[in-house]
Image (cartoon, rainbow, N blue to C red):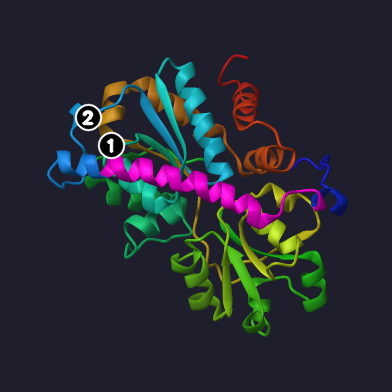
């Protein structure tokens, strides 16, 4: 990651709106998305007699590129969308749609067509009992391909870039408790508050895994609607431990410490496009080529830098997506 980064000082952070107030606005927007897609899902299910896939006659014009409700997913979906448009594919954006529990059914129902996914978590969600080496992206990709094929979905080539869940504390907490690895939390976890995305308590690679793999039992969990709120809550002493993405731009500075996953809880989490087979057949080579080229060029370092540019520096995600595509020689200016 580029070192020439300016991190906001504490005085600047004090001028930001309180976490709680910002969360209210985000939650309102998110509820609107839920109402919109839930209604569409009910219509699609009724139209196809309760089956898993919507009939092709209910297609909406353009390839629907969707994202989960966090900044990196929106950024990568925007990269996909612009790369497709450059290949002449008509695109409609369904960004910030919600968590996996909402987006995957929408993909299966044909309400959206393309989603940037993460190999390990996607496999855990679609085939939790699959017996594959979850640290090997090739094995995870094969397992995921087999899991989603019956739903009319295809897994395209994955990127080198990956983003795992990480356990984070402030520098002050790490120094005071001598923390370097997740297992170091053992003696103090029972007195600490942990925070993360709302779905964390039920996720295998989040709170469930921290309990099973590390025997960590936190007495309370604070849910945060937005990824950026977790880092701010740590800095403001609202929580003691946070679950954040390992490519989070907030980790560019030295005020937060990412603890080592010393028991190997996290699987391979390479970014990968999942596409509806019907759309891939219809659009053909331009769609496969555009998304394949993005995967071939996208690295973890790219993600960290772009995340910093968007979430810390406040740059526009669409502009950052365009800039990355231009720098990689994938589109013209």
Q: Which residue is mark 1?
A: 110
User: What is the quadrant of residue 132 in the picture?
Assistant: bottom left
Residue 81, percent from left and from top: 48, 27
Q: Extreme left residue here? A: 49
| Residue 209 against residue 57 in the figure, above or below | below
Q: Earlier in the sequence, mark 2 or mark 1?
A: 2
Which SS class for mark 1?
loop
The residue drawn where x is 56% and y is 47% is 26
The mark lying in front, picked from 2 and 1, is 2
- Can residue 226 be seen? no
Residue 31, percent from left and from top: 45, 48
**On-image quarter of the C terminus:** top right
| Residue 147 against residue 185 in the figure, above or below | above
Q: For the residue carrying disc 1, how many other residues have a C-alpha within 10 Å: few (<14), some (14-19), or many (20+)?
A: many
The answer to whether residue 22 is magenta is: yes
The residue drawn where x is 43% and y is 42% is 33
Which SS class for mark 2?
helix
| Residue 232 against residue 57 in the figure, above or below | below
Q: For the residue carrying disc 2, how many other residues have a C-alpha within 10 Å: few (<14), some (14-19), or many (20+)?
A: few
Q: Main secondary structure of the magenta part?
A: helix
Q: Which mark is residue 58?
A: 2
- Magenta extent: 14-41
248 on left or right of 70: right
**Residues marked 2 and 1 touching at CB (< 8 Å):** yes
């Amino acid at each position: 990651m580029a070192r020439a980064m300016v991190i906001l000082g504490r005085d600047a952070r004090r001028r930001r709106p309180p976490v709680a107030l910002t969360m209210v606005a985000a939650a309102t927007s998110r509820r609107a998305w839920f109402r919109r897609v839930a209604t569409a899902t009910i219509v699609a299910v009724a139209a196809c007699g309760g089956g898993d896939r919507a009939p092709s006659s209910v297609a909406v014009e353009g390839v629907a590129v969707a994202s989960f409700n966090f900044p990196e997913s929106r950024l990568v979906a925007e990269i996909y969308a612009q790369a497709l448009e450059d290949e002449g594919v008509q695109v409609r954006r369904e960004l910030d749609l919600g968590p996996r529990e909402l987006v995957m059914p929408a993909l299966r129902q044909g309400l959206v067509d393309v989603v940037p996914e993460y190999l390990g978590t996607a496999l855990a969600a679609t085939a939790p009992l699959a017996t594959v080496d979850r640290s090997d992206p090739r094995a995870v990709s094969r397992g995921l391909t087999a899991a989603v094929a019956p739903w009319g979905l295809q897994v395209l080539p994955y990127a080198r870039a990956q983003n795992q869940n990480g356990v984070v504390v402030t520098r002050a907490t790490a120094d005071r408790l001598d923390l370097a690895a997740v297992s170091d939390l053992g003696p103090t976890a029972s007195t600490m508050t942990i925070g993360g995305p709302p779905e964390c308590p039920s996720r295998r690679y989040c709170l469930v895994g921290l309990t099973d793999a590390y025997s960590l039992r936190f007495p309370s969990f604070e849910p945060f609607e937005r990824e950026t709120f977790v880092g701010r809550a740590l800095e403001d002493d609202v929580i003691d431990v946070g679950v954040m993405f390992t490519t989070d731009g907030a980790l560019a500075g030295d005020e937060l410490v990412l603890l080592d996953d010393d028991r190997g809880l996290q699987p391979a989490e390479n970014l990968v496009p999942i596409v509806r087979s019907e759309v891939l057949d219809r659009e053909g080579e331009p769609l496969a080529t555009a998304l394949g080229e993005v995967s071939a060029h996208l690295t973890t370092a790219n993600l960290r830098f772009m995340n910093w540019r968007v979430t810390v520096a406040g740059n526009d995600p669409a502009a950052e997506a365009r800039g990355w595509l231009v720098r990689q020689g994938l589109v013209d200016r």
